[in-house]
Image: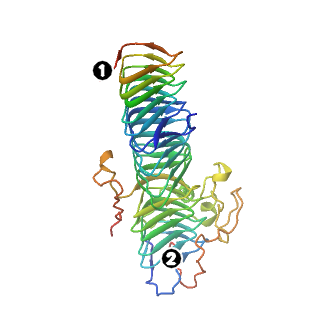
Amino acid sequence: MAQARTSSPSVDAEPARIGSGARVRGRIHGEGDLVVEGQVEGDLAIRGELTVAEGASVTSGAIEARSVTIAGALEGDVAATGTVRLVAGSRVRGNLRGSSVAIDDGARFSGRLDCEFDLPPELGGTSPRGEVRGRTAARR
Amino acid sequence: MAANVSIIGRTTRIRGRVTGDVDLEVQGFVEGEIAMGGDVTIDTQGMVSAAVRGRRVVVRGAVKGDLHGEEAVVLEDGARVVGDVRSPRIAIASGALVRGFLETGESLGAPAKASRAQQPAARPVAAPVRVAPAPARAAAPPLPAAKPVEKVAQAVLPAGSNNNVSAAPAPRRPPPPVVPALKRAKGQIAKKKER
Amino acid sequence: MASTVIGAGITVDGEITTDEDVVVAGTVRGKLTAKEGVTIEHGATVEADVAGASLTVAGSLTGNVTASERVDLQSGARVIGNVKAARVTIADGAQFKGNVDMDI
């Protein structure tokens, strides 16, 4: 099985990058940030930030990262401890979980969003109106 | 004399159906159904336990129910939605919280099917399947080009790749990195080619 | 003061309760209970029992009306139902059919 591992970055280290001409099949896991500009087929487990650049494509069963920014194409389930963001032009299919999920106008998306929060009691939840538990959904 | 925008005030509670071909603003509580031909705005204090249909549906409050925008659905900071969301365009601010199924457009289609189309038996995990030679797998663009022009992501093929088979009709150009702070990585690439 | 406006073009089938003023220019079928004033504008259609502090009707109302203060039927109003209020005025040109009870 092909595997790739990113090294722990020093303070000024640049993120690991899968260039636009590259294709990777297999599981990628690592400590730092990862920028995907090429094509990746496989699970991603990143401790840092994952960026799927415009023109890139990721096809995966499971994607885990601290935060995820998608400008390209992604198919798979995303779990972030922090933010998941789909920018305009992105095309994403899969389920997204994160402490916050942002989808820009112009992003194309099909899948579930599962943020943790309660509706106010008038709507059947348990939290008072105005209180929100934005707990992170992804656990490692 | 009545305002063009109808307003369900903050202390108003409606149990039933609210319909019409005009705009509606909800600052109070609605339980039942909202189906408007105009724009529907659920204000920060609005609470809706109902399916909501409108041309543009903007939510700043709490909704338990499915949202359907003929034109767009916008969830702003502070929105809390439990329900499915369907609209040609969906925008969700980072401060909005959602639990449900979302779908933009009529049908998204698979965004990254190119490689799979070439290797139908491929599973993305574990199996060390040999990748097909370069020309075959680059034939189809990773993004369906049949979609309306304005919705197609600009870069169809990764430029600069050595597996260029220009079968795709869409224009090719180098996809600029999205994150402005990105610099070229030198020697930091951590990837493995298939064996 | 903030008010709820059910504009022309809106139809509410159900119950409305509110602590504020209500202006109905559209259609309400069901029940309307307000703590303050209710205005049914010309062109509005209300098929509901209506309760409020005061009620001003210039449109069509079919249902029973209860107002703690007053009910005013203006010219052009068409009201079918019983009216119960401390004060009632029926303007020339208003149509009304029902009982009036001013013994609140």
- Determine if residue A103 is in view: yes
| Amino acid type indicated by mark 1 | Asp
- Name the mark on residue B191: 2
Which residue corresponds to mark 1?
A: C103
**Number of numbered markers:** 2
Chain identity of mark 1: C
Provide residue C64's location: percent of width, then percent of height. 36, 20
In the image, what residue type sits under mark 2?
Answer: Lys
> Based on the displayed image, in which of its 4 quarters is residue C82 positioned?
top left
* Towards the viewer: C68 or B97: C68
Residues marked 1 and 2, same chain: no
Residue drawn at x 45%, y 59% as measured from the top left = A76
- Quadrant containing the C terminus of chain A is bottom left
| Side of C61 where B56 appears, left or right | right
User: Which label sits on residue A46?
Assistant: none
Which one is in front, C83 or A104? C83
* Whole-percent x, y for residue A48 in the image: 44, 75
Residue extending furthest toward the left: A126
Q: Residues within 10 Å of mark 1 (few under 14, many from 20)?
A: few
Q: Position of residue B126 (x, y in %)?
A: 40, 66
Q: Nearer the viewer, residue B186 or B182?
A: B182
Q: Nearer the viewer, mark 1 or mark 2?
A: 1
Snapshot quadrant of residue B113: bottom right
